[in-house]
Image (cartoon, rainbow, N blue to C red):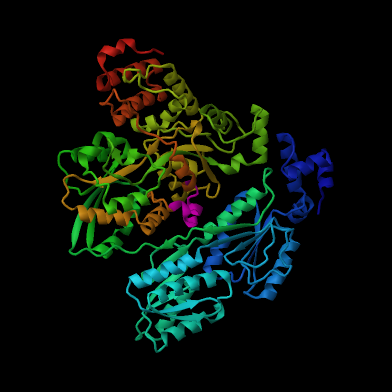
Amino acid sequence: MPTIKDIAAKAGVSHGTVSNVLNKRGNVSAEKIQLVERIAKEMGYKMNVQAQQLRAGTARRVCVIVPKISLKCYNDLYNGLEQYLREYDISIELISTNNLECDEEKAVKKALSLNPMAVVVVSSLLKNRGLYTSDTRFFFAERKVKGMPDASVYVSFGFEQAGRDIAVKCIEDGHQNVALLCENSIYSNNKSFINGVVDVLEDDNCSCKIFPSDDSMWFNKAFDILGSKEDFDAVIAMSQEDADYLRVAHQYNPDKKMPVIYALTSKSIGIDPAVCRYELNYKLMGRNIAEQIVNAGGEEAEPAQKQQIIMENDGFYDNPLPAAGKKDSICFLTIQNLTSKAIGMLLPSFTRETGIKVNMIEVSYDEHYKMAQACVQNSPYDLVRIDMAWMTELGDKIYQPFDSSSSSVKWLRQQILPSLSENYSMVHGVQYAFPLDACVQMLFYRKDLFEDELIKREFFEKYKRRLEIPKTFEEYNEVARFFTRKENPDSRTRYGAVTAYGRTFLAACDFLPRFRELKKDIFDARGNVNILIPEMKQAIRNYLDTCKYAGSDIYQWWGEPTRQFSEGNTAMHIVFSNYASEMIHNPESKVLGRIACDTVPGGQPLSGGGSVGISRFSKKYDACMSFLKWLYRKDIAETITYLGGYVCNRQISRNMDILERYPWLENMEKSFEPGWRLYKHDRNPDFNEFLFEDILGKAIRSIASGIEEMDDALEKAQEECDQAFNETSGNSNRASI
């Protein structure tokens, strides 16, 4: 096999240059990077990663030791770790101990021989007898070990609280004779859970018989419970596997009445009507441990100290709604998008639960506004979804106000993501709606391009600065120029950016973050709308610059440029987050696994999406509230999101399955905080955001298309603003460009 010395000789460069290129470090020119990589490939050189890591002192590896790989909870723990660590090029070694102390000793010795950054272990030991030392960072998950080393971290859930919660639920559901199918009580988590269950049941004089077992005997114990002469009316199981064994065992004795099953499970998507699930988020546990491992390796990391972290239990998976006393039906008007498509798929489950049928009318954006306006005078719809930009114009005219003291309204508020602005729900301080498919503009980019060492070097040589995610629109245009092939023939994408101005509201939304970046208001001191200002012209120049690094296609909707990005034609794309899932769902996507996201340059993204409320003409308030409570329920909101829509339940960001599929959702929730949409001024009560965006968007579209010069288009737009919003007497005092 060729060596670094062989490559250096053939390339005519130094040994150090080859080492820097292959190890992706050092100040090496783009020309030499290309030369060394080409010759290394021709000579068949392969990097010995393990030797490289050993020379560095500590391998970029984490070892995970669990009792059973096959158990879902430990599988989720591993996946949560792996999902986060892979972003930092940290590998994972997974070892199973079969819950045996002797195997755990071998597993730890094997792990330490690999010189890992950290070891995560679900230990089968009750006491540390010198196996675990402070020389390595150990994370003890779920089970506590007596004598853990000083630098270790213990991470677990509130197992005693989980036991108490499940026992309380059993009693509330009317059960008095309970079987507890549990794991070995010698482990701290199991002992805490059993104590929680027994304490509550005994205090209420309920019968509780414990069936302890290790994992090899669960199936046998399931038969023991179902074959017992005691007719248990409920079984509390300590895992999803326990519950599955009970159901399989029941198939062999179908005449025996099946007890209600309550199970302590790892978090998952979907409804299981046969099991009342109480969830612990093992993927999130893995994610949190991974974050600590990465942060501990940073330059500013503090010396490791012994810690104990008890994570929040996710608790019961939401229960179905009570069935309605009589069959009913409601009519729901909404826009046609991925959220409405997902809701439509799940509506049969709502009807099955409640007896209420939902007739959902999905319309295009163009029809939607007209139909929403018609709902002011009369509405055949019980529930209406409108764009949040229309709330100030239509919200208090088409919706019934919600009673803020109502328990249902309070519950719904608790489900909603707290970072969403009141613009989705309030008009003049009164709540008329709830956010539905809320979204915000985000910057999506090709991380494989931004992390490529050769590309980064080429960018540095061209612009004398590092290639980074743009924080201003000036930087955005510079990066877009670099990734546009007509400006840079070596670019791996045809275009650096995308623009969408085929419709007036698209053009306004595409443009406005650039104007907002300049921290200038559209209102003058008297509240008149004034767009004839230098900052407006500066922002338009910036937008025209972006247009030079985008394709010539004039897009009529955001889905079209999103497809172009997903098919690998562009390096960056600014779009509302509710269209981002199309990057995943597009079968022609060439960038799966290579997409990252950030806040839009300038930090002033537009909020978007819609709100839903009950029509003031509807006579079916209770049925509508049942639908809203179903819609925002955790299980329904999670399933809608998994299908590509979005209902803004605050629990979404705790679901690692969803975040792995749609990673931008985590950043999206952070982006809602600076997000904005509505301009307001106390002295201009007639201002209409939607109309303003139409006027401004018309001008932007005309300028970007080359139909009109900037000054002419802005003058016309200003005249329309004067007629729509302004006191004509103040126009002569407007600032000019």
- Residue 353 visible? The answer is yes
Q: Is residue 650 left or right of residue 683?
A: right
Picture coordinates of residue 518, whole percent (x, y)? 47, 24
At 44% across and 82% down in the image, what residue appears? 249
Prevailing secondary structure of the magenta residues: helix
Q: Residue furthest bottom?
A: 229
Q: Residue furthest top?
A: 732
At 34% across and 83% down in the image, what residue appears? 257
- How many numbered discs sit on the rendered protein? 0
Seen in the picture, residue 449 relative to 358 is either above or below; the reply is above
Quadrant assignment, res 690: top left
Seen in the picture, residue 20 relative to 249 is either above or below; the reply is above
Quadrant assignment, res 107: bottom right
What's drawn in magenta, residue-wise? 652-664
On-image quarter of the C terminus: top left
Q: Is residue 174 magenta?
A: no
Q: Is residue 149 left or right of residue 536?
A: right
- Residue 503 visible? The answer is no
Picture coordinates of residue 605, whole percent (x, y)? 44, 35
Picture coordinates of residue 444, whole percent (x, y)? 50, 40
Q: Is residue 656 magenta?
A: yes
Q: Nearer the viewer, residue 595 or 549?
A: 595
At 53% across and 44% down in the image, what residue appears? 596
Picture coordinates of residue 44, whole percent (x, y)? 75, 51
Q: Nearer the viewer, residue 356 or 481?
A: 356
